[in-house]
Amino acid sequence: MSLTAALGLELTVPPTVELSPSNAVVHWRTDVASGTHVQISPASAKAFVPDKTPSAEHTVIVTGLQPGVTYSVIVGSARVWLATNSFTTTGNAPVKTPAASAVPEQKKLVGRNPAALKPPPARQIWANWPSLPDHFARHGGDFHAKDADDYARLSWEFLQRAKAEGLPAKVDETGVLRVFDPQSGTFASYNRDGTTKTFFKPGSRDYFERQPGKSVNLKNRK
């Protein structure tokens, strides 16, 4: 019996890597829910786990990449390593090093035209990736989203517009940001790192008023 079988954990989809100029997104799947752990070398790169809730779907964002470097990735749980993969960044252009956030350089976007911004991949926008299809099924029609990725993109663009226009917003004690557009009735909440928790149009106009948190001015918020 293998070590992973003895621990009741098997890899069902091996780790794959989606590489961009500034980061890499590593995905894999296990047969049962477990924690998400990764080891990166060289150690100059940093791993960020958007959702630390135990799950069978695992996503890790690797930041701090340098040009022309081959990185090794070991994935697994807190109890056992399951598989390895590697990727090489391009060497013909400098690689930006964003903060360890699921939405790189988001703080620099305030005050710019949201329509001119290029959104990150949906996996970097949505906090709990496995929940995105369900959110899209229930609320995608509110925004005429064509698919789940489009729905995630719209939630990201709503945050950029909220910052540019200073839409009503609250921040609670955990750092969750809640934003509301009184004109369209759109509501969204975002984690401290800018990833989307939920995005929809509530049925009641006082929904935002009943949400926890203190009011903040998004135009002045750093």
Image (cartoon, rainbow, N blue to C red):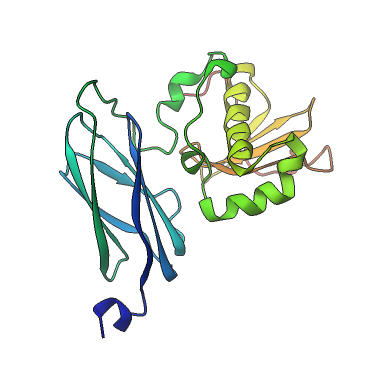
- When the figure is inspected, residue 111 is found, relative to residue 26, above or below; the finding is above
- When the figure is inspected, residue 217 is found, relative to residue 207, above or below; the finding is above
Rendered residue at 76%/38% (across/down): 142
Q: Position of residue 65 (x, y in %)?
A: 24, 34
Rendered residue at 45%/24% (across/down): 107
Q: Position of residue 31 (x, y in %)?
A: 43, 71
Q: 173 left or right of 208? A: left
Q: Position of residue 218 (x, y in %)?
A: 58, 23
* Residue 217 seen in render: no
Q: Nearer the viewer, residue 143 or 217?
A: 143
Q: Position of residue 99 (x, y in %)?
A: 34, 32
> Furthest-top residue in view?
112
Position of the N terminus, as image quadrant, is bottom left
Rendered residue at 36%/73% (across/down): 10
Q: 108 left or right of 16? A: right
- Number of labelled discs? 0
Q: Nearer the viewer, residue 140 or 12?
A: 12
Q: Nearer the viewer, residue 155 or 188?
A: 155
* Residue 113 seen in render: yes
Rendered residue at 67%/47% (across/down): 136
Q: 104 left or right of 129? A: left
